[in-house]
Image (cartoon, coloured by chain):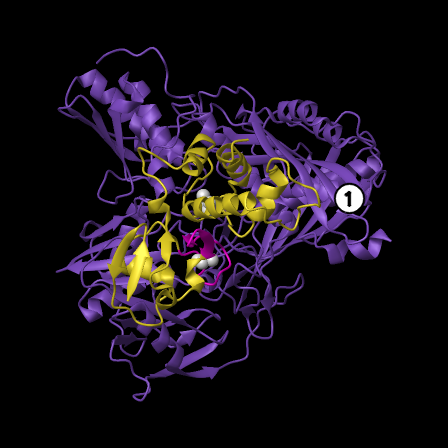
Chain colours: A yellow, B purple
Amino acid sequence: MDLVVNGVEHALDLDPRTTLLDALREHLHLTGAKKGCDHGQCGACTVLLDGRRVNSCLILAISQQGVPVTTVEGLGTEREPHPVQQGFLDHDGFQCGYCTPGQICSAVGMLDEVARGWPSAVTRDGDDGPLDDAEIRERMSGNLCRCGAYANIVPAIAQAAGR
Amino acid sequence: MTAVTERAVGAPLGRIEGPAKVTGAARYAAEYPVENLAHAWVIQSPVARGTLDGVVVDPTTEDKDLLAVLWHGNAPRLEESDDPELAVLQSARISYRGQALALVVARTPEAARRAAQVIRLEITEEPHDALLTADHPGLYTPEQVNPAFPAVTESGDVAGAFAAAPVTVDVTYRTPALHNNPMEPHATIAVWSGDDLVLYDSNQHPPGVAAAVGAVLGLPAERVHVITEHVGGGFGSKGTARPNAVLAALGARVVGRPVKLVLPRQALFSMVGYRTPTIQRIRLAAERDGTLTAIDHEAVEQTSRLYEFAEQTTVATRHMYAAPHRRTGHRLVRLDVPTPRWMRAPGEAPGMLGLECAMDELAERLGLDPIELRVRNEPRVEPESGVPFSSRHYLDCLREGAERFGWADRDPQPRRRREGAWWVGTGVAGATYPTMAQPSTARVRALPDGRYEVAVAATDIGTGARTILTQIAADELGVGVGRVHVRIGDSTLPMASVAGGSSGSASWGWAVTGACRALRESGSEEAVYDSTEEVQRQEKEGKHAYGAHFAEVRVDADTGEVRVSRLFGMYAVGRVLNPRTARSQFISGMTMGLGMALHEEGVLDPATGDWVNHDLAEYHVPAHADVESIEADWLDERDRAVNPMGSKGIGEIGIVGSPAAIVNAVWHATGVRVRDLPVRLDKLLPHLG
Ligand code: FES
Ligand code: FES
């Protein structure tokens, strides 16, 4: 099968039971996407699938042939970080760093959802001002951080959102 | 060496490994590319007590990729260990539900996992007892509590003081089992070459893991090379070797190829430790002016049949407040439950919940401001031991914190502030954590390119250790941080103590300071410094960090939902080496404290001995939406007695007292004292109407 990751096409011979997360980590050695629970409960494995954020532990790799996958490795580099990555650096938005790639990919996907006008559970009718903290917190709640860096992640994302 | 005037210590230097972490380049234990790797899956006990009599692999379901199934019937024999949890696959005896009973090794992770599902265990189940009660017939007083405190202390005439006191409080607080749940599950890749073993392992102490795994395998520690470059959190659960390291090594030995074992999240609830539930009775006796005459704090806790771990729940009570008559104690019961272990601030976190909530109840009884009550009971020396404090600025934390938080105009009466659908209240609680340092060794080398390599077998579990050691070395060498390269996370580097007890920076920084000084003074190319002698020569003084936590909560009058709208911590922790990473450490502890107060609860079903809510969907750790405003700041405290840097440990104090501040704020908002954590809405609702 073919997986397209960060713009590169990979031909892989996979067990059909292989999740997208395991394909990335075990077969392509793209270990930026993390495994925290393997059950869709923590968000550490978040990647972008055709631009939308997904928990890659809940997706079978074989079902995503040819669909563009973006992992944290595809967002930016140490020299030229993505604005969200830069926000995390500027605000110390992480400690152990294990939830971090998932938080970053999730934030990138989330900002795109906001740009498309998708509401969240805390959006009220007529809300169209800048993305406030409550919105960020609500929309990012699928990404757990046991180090408790939330108070720094919110301003990191706000900075990337241009606030 | 060129002189630099600007000091690195005290500057908010960004994390050295930050760019690697935000781009996914930082490698954690399970992420090393290793040739010919096989994958393991652990089979855990489905019963709480019994014997494993056999393991049956059904030939009709056997996978062509299956390599081995190990259990006590066929696993290689291990040497005796101080830690019976490391004697994996050695005995038929089942001590708790979730114990590792067998290890499946296969060519692919999918095959290993599938095989583990279809393999049949032949088990003789026995009746079990997994329920902690305050009057359990099996309760006993342990010889000592973690790590080496007496279990019981008593001075004065406690009974007499209570009989004579005009005001007393006698309350029982309960804390549930709590699970560390670092985001990175425990993981090991084991690679043998001959009799040498390399372990890529997620832990808080590479040299300790090398020694412990070496001991059970009958290998000298130097034949075991533990690599721990980045660690996805531990919070105590990775403080010593856990069964995964030994299981992976055994599996790799048997199949003759490297083996990776990553524990599934569910296994973390039973296989790697958790915080014991506690039942604490706290009795306070006071004069009408609030002067304490007696304190009595007793904790009931559980441990497993396999290993005695006694959390030091009431130890902080021994030195927090003055009172002439005092008693503290611990009683344990061995149950058919997983082994409890260290979790962030073992002892202080649950114990200060009990003490600081009881103090709030006493303040209410006396009609005294809770801060003033604490002011009236400030000890001049450690109350039990009589030794002086090296520094103690607890009252300054309370006063400065009160000022910043806006405490002064608080109505002392509960249930007075209503804002729309919400009852609003505020609460305060003290915090303390011991200041420790342990012997470590560091080496520094002048490199030909003008840089310096500093090496110490420390780990950075998210604390900022790599960055702080860089700053310490830069100042001692008199160079900029860019010329210092710190190497940690490898057991073959000079011996370092564990990343635990909030003692990492102090212990490793001490050794790094010594090595850099020795290099500078000798003018040689390399210097090694072992801090053992200096650390052991330390003055006997009461060395503690202090803090005060302030919480503002809103409680929904109709649903009982609790929101923490503000949580503020004011600390006195000696010299802050890096304000950026320090602030993160504080808010990290406070966030976990918020979880402890409102959300976290390991529910053990006494009928099965199983953690009912053993995953991240049902064991709720704080999420983004739970955290509104969490802030931390600190006083400028100087304490040269603690270590050469003058720093106190900061990784744990944030979880000490912050839960009590929230629980006290819930009372202030609603008038309801919840003495059984977490404060769930069903405990508030009946009283709100
Ligand atoms: S690993 Fe996928 S959500 Fe946790
Ligand atoms: S930084 Fe450690 S879990 Fe988020």
Quadrant for residue B43, please give it. bottom left
Spot occupied by residue A63 in the image (x, y as percentages of width and height): 38, 67
Which of B249 and A161 lies nearest the eye of the viewer?
Answer: A161
Q: Name the element at disc 1.
A: helix
Q: Residue at x 27, y 11 (%)?
A: B3
Quarter occupied by residue B283: top right
- Give the percent coordinates (x, y) of residue B12: 43, 24
Say left or right for B568 vs B110: right
Magenta: main secondary structure equals loop
Q: Nearer the viewer, residue B26 or B251?
A: B26
Task: From the top left corner, tell me how far across and down residue A32 is, in percent.
Answer: 35, 49
Point 18% across, 53% down: residue: B223
- Labels in figure, total: 1
Q: Position of residue B425 (x, y in %)?
A: 77, 38
Residue drawn at x 25%, y 45% is B491
In this picture, residue B163 sits left or right of residue B498 = right
Image quadrant assignment for residue B134: bottom right
Name the image quarter holding the N terminus of chain B: top left
Residue B80 shows up from this direction: no
- Visible in this render: residue B240? yes
Magenta-span inclusion, residue B457? no
How would you rate the neighbour count of disc 1 (Cα within 10 Å): few for under 14, some for 14-19, many for 20 or more? many
Closer to us: B114 or B659: B114
In the rendered structure, the answer to whether residue B118 lies left or right of residue B579 reads left
Q: Is mark 1 within 8 Å of ligand 2?
A: no
The amino acid on which the numbered mark 1 sits, given as a three-letter code, is Trp
Residue pointed to by mark 1: B667
**Does B4 sit above or below residue B615?**
above
Q: Which residues are magenta?
A: A35-54
Q: Is B9 rendered above or below residue B673?
A: above
Q: Quadrant of ligand 2?
A: top left
